[in-house]
Image (tube, grey):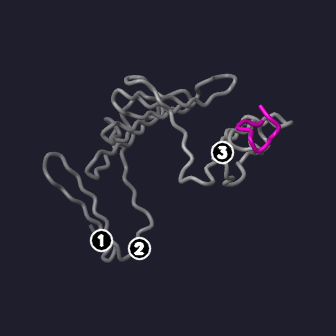
Amino acid sequence: TGSGTSNSKVTINTSGKVGIGTSSPLSGLHLSDGTNAGAPQNSGRQATLMIDAGATASADLQFMVRNGYNSHIFFGDAADPNVGMLWYQHNDNSMYFSTNASQRMTITGSGTVSIEPENGTTSSGVSGAAGGSLDLNGGTAFTGRLLFTGVNDSGTNLIGFNNESNGLVMYDYTDNQY
């Protein structure tokens, strides 16, 4: 600990803010490369972490674990300590996103994105796979929908359907016909 002298590596100021690499911490915990890049969003809060990379190319937050283990970021409150979560599963390189204590979205190691249904009981949701496909799956209710908006009147939108044979529906805005 120190009072902010030029040789000090760690500073704790009179308001309890801790600075590492800076003698003038701007947040509860301020890690700096020694050059200030700017003020944090919530500088008045003690429970703020600021990583300040004013002289280097990036400010990084890295989680390192042994092979086969997972990395987590939890968002919680007094009623539920993990009501929101980001979870990286290293054994298959997938990332999971949870809100309201339920898994809502997954990105697999191969790049497939799946947005889970709110109640988790049907297969409705959106998923996309490599190769530019986007699959809308409404389960057995066939409620998937693809909506294009903001296309000018001279544009043409193509929607393709594939059930082991190629099919195509085309809407031409110039003639207002399919």
Query: How many residues crowd mark 1 within 10 Å: few (<14), some (14–19), many (20+)?
Result: some
Numbered disc in front, either 1 or 2: 2
Q: Rounded to the nearest whole Å, what is the CA distance between mark 1 and mark 2?
A: 11 Å
Q: Do the residues labelled 2 and 3 touch (CB within 8 Å)?
A: no
Under mark 3, the amino acid is Ser
* Residue 84 percent coordinates (x, y): 57, 31
For the record, the magenta segment spans: 1-11
Tell which of 87 and 7 is nearer to you. Answer: 7
Whether residue 8 appears in magenta in the rendering, the answer is yes
Q: Which mark is residue 37?
A: none
Q: Which mark is residue 172?
A: 1
User: From the viewer's perspective, is 49 left or right of 144?
Assistant: right
- The quadrant holding residue 176 is bottom left
Query: How many residues crowd mark 2 within 10 Å: few (<14), some (14–19), many (20+)?
Result: few
Determine whether the residue tagged by mark 1 lies in a helix, strand or loop. Answer: strand
Under mark 1, the amino acid is Asp
Is 50 rendered above or below residue 99? below
Q: Which mark is residue 32?
A: 3
Identify the mark nearer the N-term, 2 or 3.
Answer: 3
